[in-house]
Image (cartoon, helix red, strand yellow):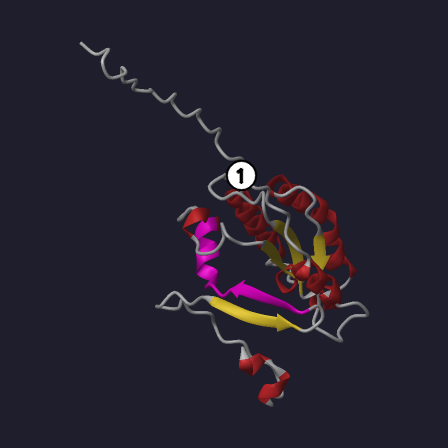
Amino acid sequence: MHPARAGSGRITPHTTRTEADPEGRDLLHLEVESPNTHLLFADLPGESFRAIRDNEISPDQVSYLAQADKVAILVDGALLSDLGERSFAINTTRQLIERLSDGSVSFANAHVCLVLTKLDELQAAGDSAVRYWDEREADILAAVQGICAGSACLRTAARGKTDEDGMEVLMDWLVEPPPEVPEPALPAQAEPPARMLRLRAPKGLSQ
């Protein structure tokens, strides 16, 4: 993460490829100052989700997915801006959503969101590229809402590249408390068996 941050001193940001941690420490910790919130992000290789999409593994085989409070399904705006790649981006997104809908993982206690990334690159490609996404967004969002009712689509861009980069809206979504999970009902307590009293005959009456 450090090479992608301003503090690294790099002229251009660089994000290294995510590798699976052999010790299973696949989490990134981010502390947000206002409001004071601690966020844990699953830092997993993209191959894990490609394997779900291609039906090579079940969603419940991916670490943390069943425990997640927030699940973002990303659509790469850079691919949508490419005439030769845009149909691939749409089809693979639909395949992933379909696989996440197989019931092996329940999202009843999570917030699921569709996130379009790199809006700045999509807009730079022209009106026809933006219109390509506009005409398909509602259909894909409806599929996401089949996983989690009330899901929305957020559009994000690199900071400073558009009038509204969507980052504040995305952060608001991230820090919004997840749905409250109702306490499981306790099983009904069986009535204790009646105590059997052992009576003793008074002295002198026993035979």
Residue 122 on image: x %, y %: 71, 64
The residue depicted at 58 percent of the width and 79 percent of the height is 4
The relative height of residue 148 versus residue 9 in the rendered view (above or below) is above
The residue depicted at 50 percent of the width and 35 percent of the height is 186
Q: Quadrant of the N terminus?
A: bottom right
Q: Secondary structure at mark 1?
A: loop
The relative height of residue 66 versus residue 122 in the rendered view (above or below) is above
Single out the residue that lies furthest toward the left: 207
Residue 60 on image: x %, y %: 44, 47
Displayed quadrant of residue 156: bottom right
The residue depicted at 61 percent of the width and 84 percent of the height is 12
Q: Quadrant of the C terminus?
A: top left
Q: Which residues are magenta?
A: 36-52
Residue 165 visible to an observer of this rendering? yes
* Foreground residue among 188 and 73: 188
The relative height of residue 164 versus residue 108 in the rendered view (above or below) is below
* Residue 196 appears left or right of 127: left
Residue 125 visible to an observer of this rendering? no
* Residue 188 appears left or right of 151: left
Per the image, is 38 magenta?
yes
* Foreground residue among 175 and 50: 175
Per the image, is 154 magenta?
no
Single out the residue that lies furthest toward the bottom: 9
The residue depicted at 39 percent of the width and 65 percent of the height is 24
The type of residue carrying mark 1 is Pro
Q: Residues within 10 Å of mark 1 (few under 14, many from 20)?
A: few
Tell me the residue that label 1 is attached to: 184
